């Protein structure tokens, strides 16, 4: 369950990422330049081996400098 699998576009248990501490996963994706992101797609087990792999609580923050962060979406919405 490697972090590199998070954004590789592939699926299956062998291509997944799972936080090492339940309920405490955190990932920072750094883009080369400012970009508009119009959606985030949650994926889970397409092979239907593990039924409980879907975030139920989340928060998405953005920053242009890596210091000041702003919440743009969350499971509270």
Image (tube, helix red, strand yellow):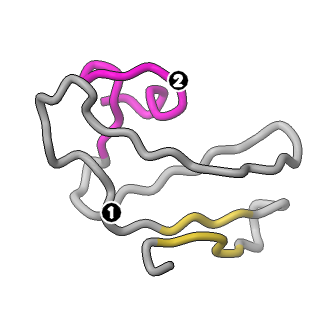
User: How far is disc 1 from disc 2 in space, using C-alphas?
Assistant: 22 Å
Q: Residue 64's spot in the image, x, y percent?
A: 84, 60
Sequence order check, earlier mark of 1 and 2: 2
What residue does disc 2 label?
8
* Label 2, residues with CA under 10 Å away: few <14, some 14-19, many ≥20: few
Q: Is residue 46 above or below residue 68?
A: above
Query: Quadrant of residue 72 in the image?
Result: bottom right
Is residue 34 left or right of 10 when viewed as pictured?
A: right
Query: Quadrant of residue 51 in the image?
Result: top left
Which one is in front in this view, the residue at disc 1 or the one at disc 2?
A: 2
Judged from the image, the secondary structure of the residue bearing numbered disc 2 is loop
Identified at 44% across, 34% down, the residue is 3
Q: Is residue 52 above or below residue 77?
A: above
Q: Nearer the viewer, residue 38 or 63?
A: 38
* Label 1, residues with CA under 10 Å away: few <14, some 14-19, many ≥20: few
**12 within the magenta span:** yes
**63 within the magenta span:** no
Q: Which residues are magenta?
A: 1-18
Q: Residue 75's spot in the image, x, y percent?
A: 43, 72
Q: Tell me if label 1 and label 2 are in contact, CB under 8 Å.
A: no
């Amino acid at each position: 369950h490697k972090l590199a699998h998070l954004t590789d576009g592939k699926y299956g248990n062998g291509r997944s990422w799972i936080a090492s501490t339940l309920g405490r996963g955190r990932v920072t994706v750094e883009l080369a330049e400012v970009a508009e992101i119009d959606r985030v797609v949650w994926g889970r087990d397409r092979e239907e081996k593990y039924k409980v792999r879907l975030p139920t609580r989340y928060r998405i923050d953005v920053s242009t400098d890596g210091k000041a962060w702003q919440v743009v979406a969350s499971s509270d919405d």
